[in-house]
Image (spheres, helix red, strand yellow):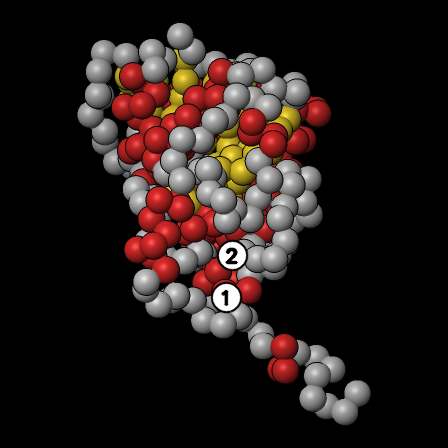
Amino acid sequence: MIRIALSGAGGQIGTVLRPRLLAAGHSLRSGGGPSRLEPLSDAEAVTTGDLRDPDAVDRLLAGTEVLVHMAGTSVERPLPEVIENNLVALHQVYEGARRHRLRRVVFASSNHAFGMHPVTERLTADAPFRPDGVYGLSKAWGEGMGRMYWDRHGIEGVALRIGSALPRPTEFRHLSTWLGHDDLARLVLCSVTAPVPGYLAVWGVSDNPRSYWDNAAAAAIGYRPAQSAEDYAAEILARENPLDPVARTLQGGGFATMDYTPQEARPGRGSGE
């Protein structure tokens, strides 16, 4: 049994993980942010509080060994909000991990830290960051923080570059990016329990033949996805692709073309230079 702290426990992903982590035999301290959660079993304690507050962080991490950090802004939002939730709060969380001598932080990174890569590329775990917005940029920063806290303080880190974590894929892009809920739990459990070489980044994706990502790094920690978006391909391919023509060419999809400057409107284009 591992004593796990789970932040963002009341969110979309946290709600999926809570019963599955408990069913695997681990104990939980689940943080629901400002929301009051009800424990699912005697093996779960719940806390509340803003993770920008060190006292709230201490309540969450007390007596735990590993943090699964799923809290924060998870979509493109104005920069001030992203800074507060994904930079300021994350720093407080890592400082709390240092105070409480946690051995590992499993961090919810995102595919959107790489969203400006073309869909024609297949990325390995060491691919360069190409964020598709300030949300993706914050996740690149978060991965850097995880690396720094391993190098400087010896806290192990696993960054999960989560794709489209949904009950089922519903559109064309998901054929490449889908992460089924059962596979999400499998990946998190491997990230909590497997030996890791200090710091590791893996792709959060199911066994999709059309995946943009080579997930050998996750296989090395025992992740064996059992779900595949291809099971839904015939149904999805019969529908219209909702993405605009540019978004269809970029791995971040619709995130990549929010507030996007078209090629013809960029500096030096169409001006005779």
Residue 54 lies, in percent from the top left, at 46, 28
Q: Is residue 164 visible?
A: no
Q: Is residue 242 left or right of residue 130?
A: left
Residue 265 lies, in percent from the top left, at 62, 82
Q: In this picture, is 141 found above or below 253?
A: above
Indicate the secondary structure of the residue bearing disc 2.
loop
| Residue designated by label 2 | 252
Check if mark 1's residue and mark 2's residue have beta carbons within 8 Å.
Answer: yes
Residue 210 lies, in percent from the top left, at 50, 49
The 10 Å Cα crowd at callout 1, few under 14, some 14 to 19, many 20 or more, is: many
Q: Quadrant of residue 195?
A: top right
Q: In this picture, is 257 found above or below 28?
A: below
Question: Residue farthest to the top?
Answer: 1
Indicate the secondary structure of the residue bearing disc 1.
helix
| Residue designated by label 1 | 247
Q: Is residue 106 left or right of residue 268?
A: left
Residue plotted at (55% across, 61% down): 250
Residue situated in front as seen by the camera: 120 or 271: 120
Indicate the amino acid at tag 2.
Answer: Gly
Residue situated in front as seen by the camera: 2 or 232: 232
Q: Is residue 25 left or right of residue 82?
A: left
